Image (spheres, rainbow, N blue to C red):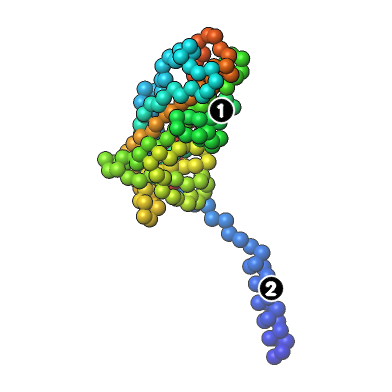
Amino acid sequence: MKKVLLATLLSACAINAFAANTVDLQVAGVLTDSACTPSLPNGGKVDFGKNALSSMSATAVNQLGYRDVNLTLTCDAATALAFTATDAHNDSAVVQLVGSKAGAADSDFGLGKTAGNVKLGAYTIMLQSNPTVDDVVTPALYSAAGSTPSWSVAGSNSFVHTNGNIIYTPGNSTTKVPTAFKKAVFPLRITASAQDTTTLAITDDTNLDGLATFSIIYL
């Protein structure tokens, strides 16, 4: 009897030891036929026009004003998704006063460089107000990018980050749950500033050359 009991206990230990050394990998996901696209007016071009060097400051940051545009996300069927932005010309970004906002490395996008390789200035992208989602004004949520977002409410005048590490979506401000939609319109304000003309040291026409890429992320 003792031998049988001992053999049973040893067998149970062996099974437990084997089970503890295994783990299951589950592969999940969704194949969807809902296609979503982001769009901007005027082919995505935000034009700040011509600014005469003679009227710009030689010693202070020059504010170039702002332009308002709408980022529109359109889907074939109601879909929960977020967007993010990255600065394609981040190597030209200057951390400086842009409008009334003090410079910040995570929200100052680059405006390109002069022929002498001097950084021209910076611009910011601001969520000016809550998005309109299928004709209903809906709060905006934001989260650090990652496999498991942790959403918070984005207030009006929140600044879009330059490095794609923050994602934005419409959603419920109480439950912090993203809202599936067919069309969402995010009002954006683009504000730009240039360095002082002494630093720029340019005498010829020089084009502002900012380039931000908006990408959508399915949730």
Badge number at residue 14: 2
Find numbered disc 1 in the image and state the secondary structure of the residue it sits on: loop
Q: Residue at x 45, y 37 (%)?
A: 159
Image location of residue 76, percent across then percent down: 33, 38
Residue at 27 percent across and 43 percent down: it is: 136
Q: Is residue 116 left or right of residue 48?
A: right
Which label lies toward us, 2 or 1?
Answer: 1
Q: Amino acid at mark 1?
A: Val
**Which residue type does callout 2 highlight?**
Ala
Most distant residue in the left direction: 135
Residue 191 position, x and y percent, is 43, 28
The residue under the point 45% across, 50% down is 151
Quadrant assignment, res 82: top left
Residue that mark 1 sits on:
94
Which of the pair 201/60 is nearer the observer?
60
Crowd tier of the residue under label 1, counting other residues whose Cα lies within 10 Å: few below 14, some 14–19, many 20 or above: many
